[in-house]
Amino acid sequence: MRSIAEKHRRIAAPVGTAGLPSDAEGQKKTGKAGRALGFVLGQLKSRIVLVIAIVAAAATCFFVPPDAAYAGYFDLDTLSCLFCTLAVVSALKIRSFFEWLAGKIVTAFGNMRRVSFALVFVTYFGSMIMANDMALVTFLPLGWFVLSSCGKEKNTAFVFVMQNIAANLGGMLTPFGNPQNLYLYSHYSIPAGEFFAIMAIPFAVAFVLIAATCMFVKPDPVKLETPPVAAPPVWRMIVYFALFALSVMIVFGVFPFWIALVVVTLALLVLEPRCFAHVDYGLLLTFCAFFVFSGNLARIPAIRAGLGALVGASPLLVGTASCQVISNVPSAVLLSNFTADYRHLLIAVNIGGLGTPVASLASLITLGEYRRRRPGTTARYLGLFSLINFSYLAVLIGSGFLTDLIFA
C-alpha cells in the first residue's frame, strides 16, 4: 500500500521533480543569476570613477563624432609613464617594501601628527620631482600601509585628502613639477626667473596652509600593531628604483616613451612577472576616457566661443572654473589659445587642481585608491575633500591676485 501511494504521489508531482524539486531548481538558477548580477554591480560600484569617465566621454562623442583627430587626444608619454610606474610600484608591493617602510616611519615619528606630516610632505616634495600623478601612485599606498600598521585606519580620509592636495600644489613652483607647467612654460617661452617669481606667493601660501592643517591632527602616540616586516633584498630594491627613475624620466622627455616602456616591461617580466596582474588597468582606462572627454569638449564650438568671451575678463577666475569641469591640463591647453596673460593663467591651472575630484586627474587617482581601501565610506571622504579643497582654493585665488604687486 505504501509503495502504491508513493507511486501516485510521484505521478501527481510536477514535471522536473525527479531527483530535484522544480522550485529548488529554479531557486538554484535564480541564485546563480543573482550572484552574477551582484558581482557585476559590485565591479561597477568599485569602478564608479571609470564608469563616469566612460559615460562622459561617450556623451561628448555625439557632439564630436570619432575621427582621425581622436588619436591626438591621448598623451602617450603620460600613459606610458603611468603604466611603468604602476608596474614598478606593484613589484615593490609584492616584495613588501611599503610594509617595511611603513614600520620604519611609525617607529621613527612616534605620534600621529608627525606621521601625518611625514606622509603629506613626502608627497609634497615628491611631486616636484616626479609630478603629481606619479607622486600619488607611489605615496598613497605608503600612507595606507602606515595607517593600517598602527591601527589608525580611521585617519585614512584626512591623510589621503592632504596627500592629494600636497601632490597638486607641491609641483607648482617648478616648470617640470606639473604637466600643465611644462606646456605653458614652453608655449609662452616664459623666462625661468619670471616663472619662479609668478609661483612664489601661491607656493608659499600653500605650504603654510598644508602645515597649519596638519597641526590639527592630535599627537596621539602610535606604535606598530603588526609584526615587523623583514627588509626586502637590497639588490632588488636598487633595480626597482632604477626602473622607477627610468619611468619618471618619460615626463621630462629625456628619451622617447617607448624606450622606457620596453626596458621596464622586459625587466619586470624577468624579475617580477606577477606584478603585471596587479597593475590598475582601470586607472589607465579612466585616463583614456578622460582624454577623450576633455579633447571633445575643446572641439565643441559653443564651449570654445563661450570660453573665448570669458577668459579675456579674468584668466585667473575663468581658468580656475574651467579646471573644475575639464581638469587642469586640458584647461591649460584650451585657454592658452585665448589669452596672452600667462601669469594669471599659470596660477589658475595650478591652484585649479583643487576643488572637484575632476579638477585634477591626480584627484581621481586618490578617489579610486580610497574607495578600494575604505569601501562604504566614500561620502565621508568626499565631504572632507570638498571642505578642505574649496577652502584652500578660495585662499589661493586671493594669493593669485597678490602676484600683481610683484609685477606692478
Image (spheres, rainbow, N blue to C red):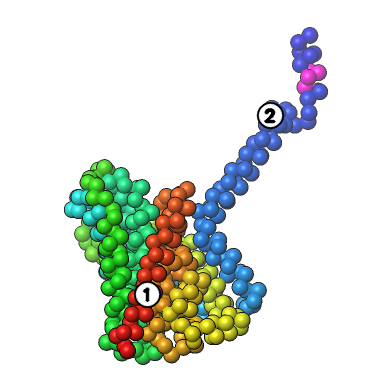
User: As displayed, is residue 400 above or below residue 366?
Assistant: below
The residue identified by callout 2 is: 20
* Magenta segment: 7-11
The residue positioned 27% from the left and 63% from the top of the image is: 211
- The percent coordinates of residue 380 (x first, y second) are 44, 52
Looking at this view, is 223 or 403 the one in front? 403
Q: Sort mark 1 into few (<14), some (14-19) or many (20+) by Cα contacts within 10 Å.
A: few
Chief secondary structure of the magenta span? helix
**Viewer-proximal residue among 65 and 161:** 161
Q: Is residue 167 left or right of residue 16?
A: left
* Residue pointed to by mark 1: 398
Above or below for 229 versus 334: above
Q: Amino acid at mark 2?
A: Leu
User: Which of the two discs, 2 and 1, sits closer to the camera?
Assistant: 1
Asked if residue 382 can be seen in this view, the reply is yes
Image x and y of residue 177, in percent: 32, 76
